[in-house]
Amino acid sequence: HVQLVESGGGSVQTGGSLRLSCATSLNPDSRYCLGWIRQVPGKEREGVAGIDWDGSTTYAHSVRGRFVISKDNAKQTVFLQMRSLKPEDTGMYYCAAERLPLCPPFMDNIQGIGVVTRGSAASWGQGTQVTVS
């Protein structure tokens, strides 16, 4: 089980920026993919951005060109830089981790192939709220 702790959420006006962080308990030898998934009450979970164990990235169509996911391998922390935020970006943002053998379907889910469920990742953080008005 991987421990994930998100931070950096908040309230921002339309067009603003936020940077989310996800501190993990992974070590540099871990073979995991990581991603950000958001949810609005009453709606399904939605993949936002993912980074595979080899550093390759994927994004949901709705955030491409605005969000960037990155990883600090030394600190095993994942970041989500969000720019040009829109009200529809509002939601609880969860950091999620999956083991290497299951990374392909995890990354597919992130970019909108298939449905994101609780079972889409082995580990989840508690979430950080992002509100855009």
Image (cartoon, rainbow, N blue to C red):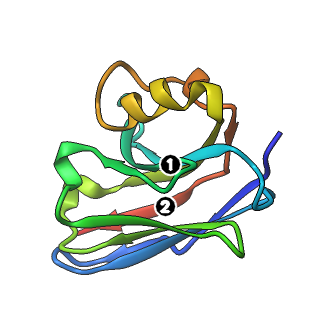
User: Can you see residue 77?
Assistant: yes
Residue 129 pos. (x, y %): 49, 61
Say which mark, if any, is on residue 129: 2
Residue 48 pos. (x, y %): 36, 48
Q: For numbered disc 1, what is the local secondary structure? A: strand
**Does residue 75 lie above or below 22 as drawn?**
below
Residue bearing the label numbered 1: 35
Q: Residue 50 vs residue 77: left or right?
A: left
Residue 57 pos. (x, y %): 38, 52
Occupied quadrant, residue 100: top right
Q: Residue at x 50, y 47 (%)?
A: 52
Question: On the rendered image, what quadrant is the N terminus found in?
Answer: top right
Question: On the rendered image, what quadrant is the C terminus found in?
Answer: bottom left
Q: Residue at x 57, y 49 (%)?
A: 53
User: Depth-wise, is mark 2 or mark 1 nearer the camera?
Assistant: 1
At label 2, counting other C-alpha atoms closer than 10 Å, the crowd grade (few under 14, some 14-19, many 20 or more) is many
Sequence-earlier tag: 2 or 1: 1
Q: Residue at x 67, y 50 (%)?
A: 125
Q: For numbered disc 2, what is the local secondary structure? A: strand
How many circles with numbers are drawn on the protein?
2
Residue 25 pos. (x, y %): 81, 58
Q: Residue at x 44, y 26 (%)?
A: 116
Tell me the CA gap for discs 2 and 1.
16 Å
- Residue type at mark 1 is Gly
Occupied quadrant, residue 18: bottom left
**Does residue 59 lie above or below 27 as drawn?**
above
User: Can you see residue 42?
Assistant: no
Say which mark, if any, is on residue 132: none
- Mark 2 vs 1: CB contact within 8 A: no
- Residue type at mark 2 is Gln
Q: Residue 118 vs residue 24: left or right?
A: left
The residue closer to the viewer here, 84 or 61, is 61
